[in-house]
Amino acid sequence: MEKIIDPVSVDLLKAELTPDKKLRDSNKGGNEIYVINHHNSPNLMREIARLREISFRDGGGGTGMEMDIDEFDTMEKPYEQIMVWDPDAEAIIGGYRYILGPDVTFRENGQPNITSADLFHYSDTFIKDYLPHVIELGRSFVTPEYQSSKAGAKALFAMDNLWDGISAVIMLHPNIMYMLGKMTMYPSFNRAGRDLILHFLWKHFGDKEELVRPYNPVMPVSNGELMDLILCDKDFRDDYKNLKEAIHRLGTNIPPLINSYMNTSPSMKMFGTTVYDEFGSTEETGILVCFNEMYPEKRARHVDSFLKNKMQEIRGRFPNLAEDFEQKLSERWNQRRDNAFSRFLHRRGRQKRKEEQ
């Protein structure tokens, strides 16, 4: 393990927090959310890379380098970084990096040049039908200081703030309908608990179309019949309670990010699990979540606050707009996204019928 770099000067960080990079204010916690990249904010990128390495080492992973930065952060058209900033402490709380499907280039083997392509093989169907409508997310982190309850509301809503950022990016791109990502379990996590979680995911979210598959899949080693006796309900909610109780009896909890994704959408697809040797041998589970099919309360929590935030910004510039402006613009924004999703489903249905003929 290399020694992690020293913190970047706060003055250098603040100098790069320009208004054009601000995405929105957080829904809770009084924080600010920005989108930056290596080219337009090298100091912020360096601090993000430092904090990522600290956070991942703290959890049992990490690159072992002086900071967590790679070619996807620094390439000609790099991944963008969603960053949550605490204006009171003048510190970065957490972040996510992403790339939009239309910006993805391809490798010589025809696979997309995205971070997960070293671990997962993407089918022709996925590349043709889904990739243009995907935001690939990765390197999610919350700094250790904001994982403690001692940090108060700032810590309580840290992950929630990141969802605010993701939702805002998606709302600004109506043709982006799916979140492609990985859920991480560290090597130190209870083995029996890991098997139960994987068994649960395959049972309720298994990718029956085989859109994506890991190159080197990790399979549960626990007895399948025994796990079926524990996870015995067909209904997701009832079986989720079974899973939580079983994991709790093992003396641990479902990892927060996995727990969050499980409760995001009933149509989530799980692509399997593999080991990420270059990142501390973490176990990565590929997933695909449809933004339009998220649970209404989850989507409303982040989308409604984004729209309200955007309306206030517009009315601040144009105070004489009609009284019903907010309602009409909100309806138009949501209708545009619903129309795009309907067109996608129509094209996808037509393609599937052709394949079945």
Image (cartoon, rainbow, N blue to C red):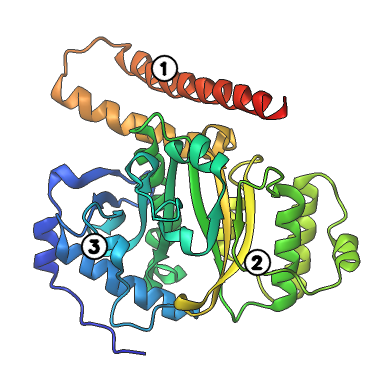
Residue 316 horizontal side relative to residue 48, left or right: left
The label number, if any, that marks residue 74 in the structure image: 3
Which residue is painted at 80% across and 49% down in the image?
238
Sequence-first disc among 2 and 3: 3
Which-is-in-front pick, marks 1 and 3? 3
Q: Which residue is mark 2?
A: 217
Is 3 above or below relative to 259? below
Task: Give the Cα distance between marks 1 and 2.
Answer: 44 Å
Sequence-first disc among 1 and 2: 2
Q: Secondary structure at mark 3?
A: helix
Q: Quadrant of residue 175?
A: top left
Q: Secondary structure at mark 1?
A: helix
| Residue 157 visible | no
Q: How many marks?
A: 3
Viewer-side residue, 76 vs 1: 76
Please state which amino acid type lies under the numbered disc 2: Pro
Is 175 above or below relative to 327? below
Which residue is painted at 36% across and 46% down in the image?
104
Q: Which residue is mark 1?
A: 331
Please state which amino acid type lies under the numbered disc 1: Glu
Q: Quadrant of the N terminus?
A: bottom left
Q: Residue 157: where, in percent of width, then height?
A: 43, 55
Q: Residue 70: where, in percent of width, then height?
A: 31, 68
Please state which amino acid type lies under the numbered disc 3: Thr
